[in-house]
Structure formats: C-alpha cells, structure tokens
Amino acid sequence: MSRKDPQTKQQRSFFIKELFAFALLFILLGFTVYSIFQNSVFQNINQGLVNQRTQILNNESQPTIKINPNKGTANISPSIGGPFRSTTIVFNSKGIIINKPMLGNHFYSLIKNIQLDKTQTDKVYDMTIGSQNFTSHFRTLLVKVPKSNPNPLYAGNYAMIVENVDADLLALKSFERAILITIIFFWILAISIAYFLSRSSMKPILTSWKKQRDFSANAAHELRTPLTVIQNQLEFMLTKPNDKILDQAEKISTSLNSVNQLQTLTAHLLTLSRSDADTVQVNMQSQLLEPFFKEVITPYQDVAASQSKTLTVAVDAPGAGVFDSGLMRQLIVILVDNGLKYSPKDGTIGVSVNRIKDTLTIKVSDNGPGIPNEDKKRVFDRFYRTDKSRNSKTGGNGLGLAIASTIVKQHHGKIAVHDNQPTGSIFEVSIPLKNHSTNLTTK
Ligand code: ADP
C-alpha cells in the first residue's frame, strides 16, 4: 500500500490532532491542579494574617506553653490560628519602627528600610526584601490599631504583620517542576498509547477499505469482459447491414451469452452488496426438510445427464427445520453448479443431506480437479479463482462461493472444502436448524 493512501494520511492527521488534544488536556489539568494548590497555600497564609490581626485588635494572648505537672507533658496552644512564622513590625504614625528589640538584630537589619505606606492599610500584599545575594519574600497585612487598644505597644500605631513565604514559594516551585515533569511524562505515554490504539483500530478499517477497493476493481474488470464481447459482436454486425439474423446467429448467440454473464454478475454483485449493507431480508421459516431438498436437487440430475455426467442424491433428513428457503436453494444451486462446472465429462457429482439431531449437513462432492490446499480457504473470497484460464472457459466470476459463504453465515452455520478421494472436492455445509429461530431478520 502506498504511503500516500488517504487512510495513512487520515491516520497521521488523527495522530497530530490527538497530540494537540492531549497536550491541551494535560496543560489544562496541570494548570488547574497548580492553581488549586497555589490558592490553598496562599489562602492559608492570608487566613493566618487575618487571625493575627484579630489577635492584635482584640489584644488576645500570644501562643502559650502549658506544662501538665501530673503527666509531665507540655501542651502548646497557639493563639487562634496564629502562625508561628509571622512577625509583627510596629510603626508609629511617623513611620518609625518602635519594636526593634522584639524583632531581633538580624531581622531588624533586613527590614529597617521598609517604608510605612498607610494607603496599604487592611490590604494583604507581597513584599520582597533583601540585597542582590539574598532576598526574602513576605506576605504582609498592615493594621491601624485604635488608640483604645489596651496594649500600649500597639495603641494608636500601625502593626505590620509579616509572614515569611520563602518556604511556600519553594514548595510551589518544586510542585510546579513536579507537575511539569508529570505532564510531559503522561503526555508522551498518552500519545504512545493513542498511537498504538489508533493503529490497531485503523487496521480493520484499512482491511475493509482494501477489500472494498479490490472488490470495485474486480467488479469493473469482470463487467468489462462481456461488455467488450458484446461491443465487438455488435460492431461486426453493423458492418453487414444486409445480412439476415440467421447469417449472424452465432454472433447474436455469443452476445446473448455475454448478456447472461452480465446478468448473473450484476445479480451476484447486488446480493453481496446487500449482504454487506445488512439489508438482505432473511425469511426464516419452518420447512419439511426431505421434500424441500429433493425438490431443489432432483432437477439437476437431468442437467447432469445432459452433460453426460451423473448426479446422485441422498437425502436423509427427517422432520422440519427453520431456514430461508430462497437462500438455501441459492446455496445448493451454487454448490451443485460448481460440481457440474468443474467435474470432467462422464464425471460424478454426489449431493447428500443429513440431519443429525438439530444440525443439518449438506455435502456436495465431485471428481473434478479438486482444490489445492493453499486455495481451500481463499475460494470463499470474492472474485477468487484458483485458475483464471480454466475459469474463463467455465464462465465463472469467482463470486459464487463468496455468496454461498454469506448465506451460510446468515444461517449461523459453517462451510468448508475438503479433498475427495481419489480426486475432486467435497463442499461441506453444516447449519443449526433451531437455535437461530429467534433471529428472524426483517430489514
Ligand atoms: P466461479 O464462478 O468462478 O465458479 P466460485 O466462487 O463458485 O466462482 O468458485 C471460486 C473458485 O473456486 C472457482 O473459480 C474455482 O477455481 C474453485 N472451485 C469452486 N468449486 C470448485 C469445484 N467443485 N472443483 C474445483 N474447483 C472449484
């Protein structure tokens, strides 16, 4: 198959679309997870700042450690949700830090240049402090403490609650990296899986497309041969306008043969395309087996005799069975017709119908050339012929057994071909007579 097949192109375009779809999906997923995580981290920090403000405004106590003398254990009770990481810088109204001793020298040296921005009062905002070598990130909340506050440190001043978020930012950074690696890993995994899935799901489509293409090409080829014959005969007759019909009887008969061939071929093509479209009306009905099969097969004894051949019939199938009589007749005709076609002059064709419990077995044997092992399965393929030159003489088009196989499938049965002894072939069909009685398709 050429690499430029529309199916291959289609497969490639599917794959590229999947590539983008998965990328988009994973980016969205990563972005959502990251946003949720980031929000929850900063929400906790903000909540801590708000709690701290409540403590300052209500002059609530700082975290205490209570020693339990009986048990010798310590209970740490932080002030309502107050974070341990936060520090409060107190500014007077002139913007001078007034709680330097509480801040410690190291922290004070870091924040000593912070300007009090009164416009930021009651707002949570981020602040980066530090030099070129070292920076620290804080989330802050500035509170204007009323003069009435009982704590003289805060009363009438500004309390800036600062919480160090370096650890949180670091955690977010690692999380971001982890999410990115996970996304890339799963994206590659997903597209690999999608690639293999699309390949395997395209396989049956490609096979059936190839079958369809071969079918159309074969059908066109088969139609062309009889059409060319008819055209040649008619063109020749046109050159003899004064001839009588009798003078051109041979040409007319050849043309009629070709017309018959065309008729059979188009009927076969129609049958197969209907069965492909699942629009064949399978009319399952209960039939008495012996009268039905005898009535279908017996007339072929005369046909065989007219060809100096012998057709033997053995029907041992008591009782009734459920099947489509029209399709069953077509099946028998195809097999018997092939037996007659491929058996030699003075050949023998045997047809037997047996019922064993609820299984009907039909065998059609002949003493023709037989079918080589490598062709035994393929003879049921459309347009397959074991020997093209021999078949051109028999007028076959390689569709009979394909139709037979379809009919057998419609009856939930099996068809196979074996070797006859000493020569020839035996076509064996087995059909369950009861189990599919519920499948009365009416399409
Ligand atoms: P056709 O119309 O060519 O007979 P079929 O589908 O009936 O098409 O058969 C397919 C091919 O199987 C035939 O072309 C022939 O090569 C082979 N075949 C079918 N039946 C027989 C048989 N009874 N003996 C030998 N070859 C057979």
Image: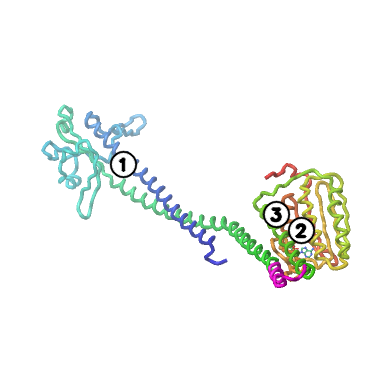
Q: Label 1 sits on what residue type?
A: Phe
- Name the residue: 37% across, 53% down: 177
Task: Compute the Cα span from label 1 to label 3.
Answer: 72 Å
Q: Position of residue 128 (x, y in %)?
A: 22, 47
Residue placed under numbered mark 1 in the picture: 42
- Name the residue: 74% across, 59% down: 400
Mark 3 Cα within 10 Å, few/some/many (few <14, many 20+)?
some
Camera-nearest label, 2 or 1: 2
- Name the residue: 24% across, 29% down: 60
Of 179 and 90, the residue lying toward us: 179
Name the image quarter holding residue 284.
Answer: top right
Residue placed under numbered mark 2 in the picture: 416
In the current view of this chain or complex, which residue is farthest to the left?
94
Q: Is residue 79 above or below residue 305?
A: above
Task: Tell me, yes or no, whether the highlighted magenta stretch contains residue 239.
Answer: yes
Of 218 and 361, the residue lying toward us: 218
* The N terminus sits in image quarter: bottom right
Name the image quarter holding residue 64.
Answer: top left
Q: Position of residue 365 (x, y in %)?
A: 83, 61
Residues tagged 1 and 3 counted as in contact (Cβ below 8 A): no
Q: Which residues are magenta?
A: 229-244
Residue placed under numbered mark 3 in the picture: 271
Name the image quarter holding residue 381.
Answer: bottom right
